[in-house]
Every structure is written in C-alpha cells, then in structure tokens.
Image (cartoon, rainbow, N blue to C red):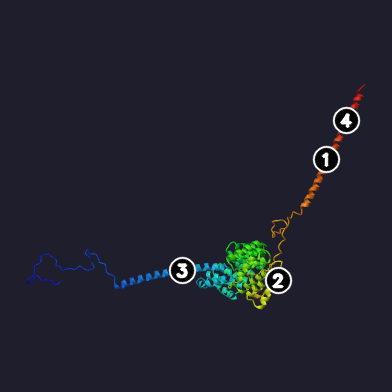
Amino acid sequence: MTKTDPTSPGAEPTEPGAPEESFYEVPVELDDDGAAAPTPPPRDRRLALKVAAGVIALLVAAAGLIAYRAHHRRAVLKAGLARADELLRLDTAAGYREAAALLEPLAQLDHLEAGSVRAFALAMLFADYRDAGAEAEAAQLLVEPGRAEVVPRYAHLADAALALGRSSLGDATTAASAAQGGVWAEALQARIALRAGTLSAAIEPAAAAAEDGAFAAGLAIEGDVARRARNDPAAARASYAAALAASPTHPRAAFGLAKLALAGRIPPDDAVRALRRLLGDPSTPAPERGRAALHLAALQLRAGDRAGGAATLDSAGMDAPVRAWAERAAEKAAASRNGYEVADGTPAALQSASDDDPWVAPPPAPIPDHVGADPLDARPPPKHAAAKPHVKQASAKATGKKATTKKASKTAAKGSSAKKSAQKATTKKKAAETAARAQP
C-alpha cells in the first residue's frame, strides 16, 4: 500500500494518535480470535491417505474372498463326503467305483479325510472284486493319513479291507479293531470271522452292523450268520430281503437267498427274482453275474426247466471251459437233496468274495405227526424225560415200604395188647388165690 506524506501539498491531516491502517497486517495463520488456522494437508499426504484406504479395502476384500473360499471348500467337502457315504453303503462294485470317482478331486483338497474315504472305496473294490489297480492306488492314498497324529477312521477301514483282500486275516482284524466301532468296522469283523471259520465270533459284530436297517453290508452279513452259524432260515431270509431293499443288486444277499432256496428252506421265487436282477445288471462284474447264472440255472433245472437253465448259463457270456464247468455244477446243485454245496475246482472267472462259504445245509427236519408243529423245530427231548419211569418205580417202591411198615406196626400193636391182657389175667388170678387163703 502507498503511504501519503503529510508534508506534501494537498495531503489531508490525520488525527493525532490514530494508527495507520497499513501499519500491521494480520497473518493468515491467525483467525479473527487470534487462534491458529488449520493448515491444509500437503498433496502427497492426501495421496498417501488414499493409497492406505485402497490397501485396506483390498485387504478386506481378500479376507472376505478367503473366508468365502474356505466356507465353500468346507461345504463342497461335506456334500461330497455325504454323497460318497450313500454310494459306499450300497456295497456294490458300481457304488464303490462311483464313490472313488466322486472323491478324486476332493482328495486333493483334503488328503486326510476325503483321501481316506477314497482309499476305502478303492480297497473294497480290491477286496470284493479283485481290482489290482484299486489296491495300488488305495495304498498310495493311505501314506499321508497313516503318518497323521490322529489316523482317520476310514484309513483304518481301508487297511482292514486291503488285508482282507490279501487274506491276511490277523492284520485285517487289527485294522478293523483300530477303527473303534461303527457299522463298517462291525461288518468287516464279522466277515473276517466267517472267512476264518470261527462262526460264533461273527454273531455279535454282525448283529451290531445290522442294527442300521438301511445298511446293506451289515444286513447281508447278518443273513450269512443266521444261515450258517445259527441255522435260522427265517431270520436269514428277512436279513437278505432287507439288504436287497436297501441295495437291489447286492451280490451277497442274492446269493444267500439262492442257497436257502437250494437247501429247500425257502420257496425259490425270492431267490429267482434277485438272481435275475443281478444277472441283468451291466455294472455288476462278470464273476458275480456268472455266479448268479449258476445258482439261477440250478433252480431252473430242479424245477424241470432244462431249456431255461441252459439259456441262463448262455446269457452270462462265459467261455467254453467255464461254461462247461458251470453246467456240471448247476446239475449237481439241482440234484442235491442235502442242501447247497460248493462244487470243487471253481474257475477263477467264477470266484467271488461275495459267494465264498463252503456251507452245506443239513437236511430239513421231519414234520412231526401232531398238527401245528414247526418242521424246523427239531428240538431234542428234555433231559429229565427218560428219568420219569424211574421216578414212578421209585414211588412204587416207597409205597410198598410204607405199606409193609404199617402192617408191621399193626402186628406189633396186636402183640402188645395180647401181652397186656395176659398180664392182667395173671394178676387177677393171684389176687383171688390170696383172698381164698385168707378165709377161715
């Protein structure tokens, strides 16, 4: 601002004591009250704040994405394992293969749990259907679960199935016991006992496995135990039927009904339906379809349908030597009146782990003469039945002894009375004589 000189001409006089307007300028840093005004942030500081906010937003988004992916992974694993469990419970070759295929990508996400379940599916394919490739793959999948601090239950079950397929029954028992219960462990323990020929040891685990009314593997093995260990055809038939209701192409249940029918314990209709269904299932392996054809042909031959039996054997697609053996075995089973009997020299193409027992049924018990008797109730007579005649004889002897004792007692009593009467008479006689002597 330009200052006016007061001494210059034309200048207006100023009032004394009045300060000049331009003497002091208020700094921009102070407001009207004299307080410091906020300093606007520099440009680089504003940029840093924006970058920090962006980084925080990215971190939040990444954390959300990770949490979502973890949740999605858990959901996928849970759904996949649930579906695999449904397939495994069918206890068929098709069920095991589909479960193994379903779990293949999931085993990459979860080496312990999903990997162990997939190993079990492959191990059962080896144990029941002789799939050598499945054995090697299952063993590889079990390496990491076997080293875990806590070995998953399905890893123990897979070890048990592999050992059963190798006929290492001691190792199979140890692995099944390590699984610590569950229907699969119980079913495997029952199967191991039957394979070892210790039928009584299979009763308890088979009953535990069959408590789940929709578990085909447990129901079928319970049927085998009822048929072989308890000789209870009615219970065996019910267990096999329940297994087929849960898994319509279950081989062990179908073969069990066939053996009951060939033993004359049940009508053949139930067995025929189950065998036809198994024979017509393309997902069932060739050995099991061949066994179904063998049993079905035997039932047809027994019914007098030779053409039907021959057509059944032809439909199984056997080669000539196997076909010839199957025909002889079917004729032998049809002619047998002592129950089902395994034919010798079974070809490898017809060997099945689901039809592995050498059981021969005893002949049916004769029907009692009295009406309403159960022909299967061949109970021995009570142990005390033969002792009844001796009891009667002993009673008769005791009665005779009592009669003799009574007679002797009567005789002794009579003798005593007579003796007393004689003594009285003697006494009276002496008294009379004494009185006579006393008279004058």
Q: Earlier in the sequence, mark 1 or mark 4?
A: 1
Direction bottom: furthest residue: 320
Instruction: Please state the horizontal and vertical placement of residue 238, each as a whole percent of the image.
Output: 62, 62
* Disc 3 element: helix
Q: Which mark is residue 409?
A: 1
Q: Earlier in the sequence, mark 1 or mark 3?
A: 3
Q: Is residue 269 visible?
A: yes
Identified at 37% across, 70% down, the residue is 57
Left of 89 or right of it: where is 17? left
- Give the label, 2 or 1, closer to the camera: 2
Kindly report the distance in space between the C-alpha atoms of the residues bearing marks 3 and 4.
129 Å
Name the amino acid, label 1: Ser
Do labels 2 and 3 touch, CB within 8 Å?
no
* Disc 2 element: helix
* Disc 1 element: helix
Instruction: Please state the horizontal and vertical placement of residue 37, each as a whole percent of the image.
Output: 25, 66
Name the amino acid, label 4: Thr
Name the amino acid, label 3: His
Residue bearing the label numbered 4: 427
State the residue in front, 194 or 94. Answer: 94
Residue bearing the label numbered 2: 332
